[in-house]
Amino acid sequence: MKVSAKSNLYRLLPSVDEVLRQPEITALIEHEGQPAVVEAARLVLAQLREQVTTGNLASEEAVQLALVNLSEAVSRQLCRALEFSLKRVINATGVILHTNLGRAPLPESALKRTSEVAGRYSNLEFDISAGERGKRDVHVERLFSRLLNQEGIGGIRTVVVNNCAAAVMLALNTLAEGGEVVVSRGELVEIGGSFRVPDVMAKSGAVLHEVGTTNRTRIGDYERAIHERTRLLLRVHRSNFAIVGFTEQPSLEELAALGHKHNIPVMEDLGGGALLPLRSLGINESGVMESLRAGVDVVTYSGDKMLGGPQAGMLSGREDLIKKIRANPLFRALRVDKLTYAALEATLMEYVRQNYDAVPFARMMRLHANDVRQRAETMQKNLTSAAHLQVEIVPGESLIGGGSAPTSTLSTFLLAITAQSLSADELAARLRASDPAIVGRVEEGRLLLDLRTVFPDEEPAMVNALLGLG
């Protein structure tokens, strides 16, 4: 196309001001505001100019046809620009604590409390009875105290920071800065996001003193490493992998006894941090109470893993050590806000009431495989009209996820779906493109959906999305 011809086509395109005077665009401005609409109009006009330049719009008729739908194009661009990036997703993977999908869903009571606290002023740091400044810790400290100071354990205090990595950093900096921390070589782990124990220890100002070997560390290895610069004995829970075979590791009781013998605190980075007795559910994981009962002085754990609450990092342990940790200037930099306290308080209250099924993580974990199968059979019946799909129910396994309980799985039943004209990967992509997005997993050429991690009120949306794939 000649330059002069393209110039004529460019002149057919309206200015931004002309676009804004169109009745449909004026209505958009009233609802969404002028700045956003102006930006959308500019982008649409720029796209039209680009199409003229590349020859995709090569005649006056083509440009005029594109301009007929100009207001619709601006509206679509505006919707894309104002669309939220963080969206609700239906988790049909069977991974309960799916890190990429936000880990633990919050209890309904936590959502309600967060809304109540977020929309108005609160007594976050105000003592109402005294009429003076208070401490934000009190809102959850009383609940942690009720949950942890039992079964012969007393004097346990808890503080909260923004995640478990921050809790580990804060504890190491407080208890061991400038001194040595003894840890087994088999526990120098890396978890998601390149969180490496040696790197965090170096940043905290503590000095790593590794003992033992990758697969075998004895209590004598710890004792021989202790000298005048030793400040802490550290146990790091292998939350996202397992070492099996020719292995040895001292018990927490042995490690705690050694620490008390030499007057050196013992800390465990537990990671998950369950308040439920997981072993009774067939999960090979220890909880916070088991660590404290074994004599560990400080335990660090997450709020959005096996506690089933918001993202947070807890430090629970001896009162004198927790007070020292709270007095560290880093505590203020790592502390949590009112929304986290509100959600955490509501979650802990469900544990105090022993209303475990109100916590989605706990409810999903406690769900029997036969209950999952019944729900899968109902969904299979609701899909009988979908001639384009073949739906089977097969046994499978659900995972805890979130870097927790790597050797433990939960028996479940899966919807195994294939389509006549779509591959399993294409099926999965179509479901991810639905609203809300549905995320499953693909194995052996089939799309697998595990209803253990699907909320019952999400099942109709799944059925509609699957029926619409034809």
Image (cartoon, rainbow, N blue to C red):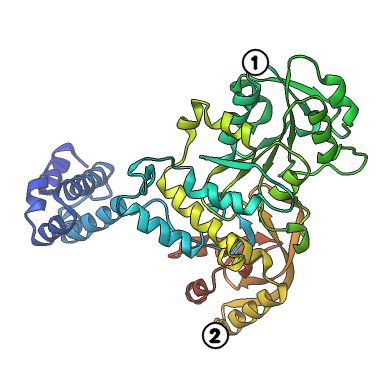
Q: Quadrant of the N terminus?
A: top left
Q: Residue at x 12, y 58 (%)?
A: 30
Q: Where residue 459 appears, x then y in whole percent?
A: 53, 74
Taking the image as drawn, is residue 314 in sight?
Answer: no
Left/right placement of residue 351 relative to residue 408 reads left
Which corner quadrant of the image does residue 371 belong to?
bottom right
Q: Nearer the viewer, residue 56 or 241?
A: 241
Q: Where residue 413 appears, x then y in whole percent?
A: 70, 72
Q: Which residue is mark 1?
A: 178
Q: Nearer the viewer, residue 452 or 157?
A: 157
Where is 123 relative to 419, above or below? Answer: above
Q: Residue at x 59, y 67 (%)?
A: 355
Q: Nearer the viewer, residue 49 or 349?
A: 349
* Classed neighbour count for the residue bearing mark 2: other residues with Cα under 10 Å, few (<14), some (14–19), many (≥20): few
Amino acid tagged 2: Ser
Where is 180 relative to 338, above or below? Answer: above
Q: Which residue is mark 2?
A: 385
Q: Residue at x 66, y 47 (%)?
A: 272
Q: Where residue 367 appears, x then y in whole percent?
A: 67, 70
Taking the image as drawn, is residue 384 in sight?
Answer: yes
Determine the CA span between mark 1 and mark 2.
69 Å
Where is 264 relative to 135, above or below? Answer: above
Left/right placement of residue 256 relative to residue 85 reads right
* Classed neighbour count for the residue bearing mark 1: other residues with Cα under 10 Å, few (<14), some (14–19), many (≥20): some
Residue found farthest to the front: 130
Which corner quadrant of the image does residue 449 belong to?
bottom right
Amino acid tagged 1: Gly
Where is 445 relative to 186, above or below? Answer: below
